[in-house]
Amino acid sequence: MKQFLTFAGKEFLHIFRDTRTVMILLLMPVVQIILFGFALTNEITNVKFAVLDHSKDALTNTITERLSQSEHFIFEKSISTEEEADYLIMSSKVSLVVIFGNNFRESLGHKGESQITLVADGSDPNTAAGVLRYASAIIASEARPVNEYTIEPVVRLLYNPQMKSAYNFVPGVMGLILMLICAMMTSVSIVREKETGTMEVLLASPVKPVIVILAKTVPYFLLSVVNLTTILLLSVFVLGVPVTGSIYWLVLTSFVFIIVSLSTGLLISSFATTQVAAMLISGLVFMMPVILLSGMIYPISNMHVILQFIAQFIPAKWFIESVRKLMIQGLPVSSVVKELAVMISMGIAFIILSIRSFKQRLE
């Protein structure tokens, strides 16, 4: 028993001497429960909507007010044309447009006749389905006192009228795979050299350290290009998700994200000393947030405000938004200028931090 306690105490000492191990063991469960608790939700909240009211009667005003008072919706503005409705959806300024037809109240007495149209963004079918469900329920509850029939609004989904789930997960999978190949594998590759002692030999050679590091990242860049090509071909010819926008700008945007992911891997390798540590840092700090906080599965607008703030610093979030706009919605490159600027800024910042860290280690 004494020997058992001695060895157990020794193991505890080893654990608590390594600050990183302690943080992983004690903080990882806290981080996971917070992320899963606040990010994994099917509830739709803070959905911005606009109204095109051709009727302008008391009932349409009541329905609009009821939607505005709901915790699920935020009234953005009233509009006057359907072209403006499409523009608001296209520019992501609203997620829903409610269109009331002429003589809305009077038309409720005619069975089978619908004078209300709901326009939503189908590029994210999960969110669109929830938005339409909530809006339809509120409209039906307000109109029921003056109508014996159930109202069935006409639904118009932009970009994905068939509500194919592939339209939603293809951009997310692209971001996840590219981050996995670039960040995680690059960091592990460089840390492997440091762990075996060969990195010091390479850095002591006549070749400049920056050249050595960049040379080690080139294979992963090329592998990522191959993966990108494979994903796009499978998406178009197997999953039936067309590239409705410019393939040139889609590929160029993907290259920017690959460079950002490679610089992320370099940054991880500058802090990690073992391959296990690099894997844990990649998985805990980058991979899990990519899945939960990038908008890949769950809308960021539904999350807690703190998680929404953290999501702004996740490169995959900006890449996924860019792919949805360029590939799914077919928008011009001007619609992703903000996303490109953020990713380029992140890439430059990560590269500078990585180079400075490596120089400090050399000194």
Image (cartoon, rainbow, N blue to C red):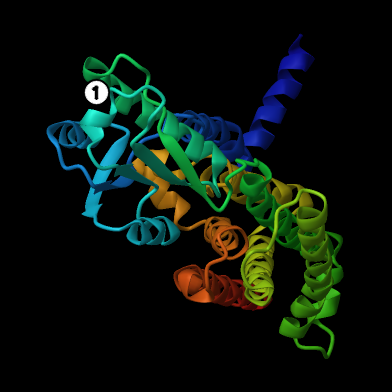
Q: Position of residue 330 (x, y in %)?
A: 57, 65
Of residues 348 and 120, the one nearer the viewer is: 120
In the rendered image, residue 72, in percent from the top left (x then y), is placed at 32, 33
Residue type at mark 1: give it. Glu
Image position of 278 with respect to 40: above or below: below
Task: Using the image as rendered, state which of residue 135 and residue 299 is in the foreground.
Answer: 135
Number of labels in the image equals 1
Residue at image location 74% in from the left, 12% down from the top = 2
Apparent side of residue 206 relative to residue 30 in the rendered image (left or right): right
Q: Residue at x 41, y 62 (%)?
A: 91
Q: Which residue is mark 1?
A: 142
Name the quadrant containing residue 165: top right
The C terminus sits in image quarter: bottom right
Residue drawn 22% across and 30% down?
A: 105
Residue 134: x and y in percent read 38, 29
268 or 288: nearer the viewer: 288
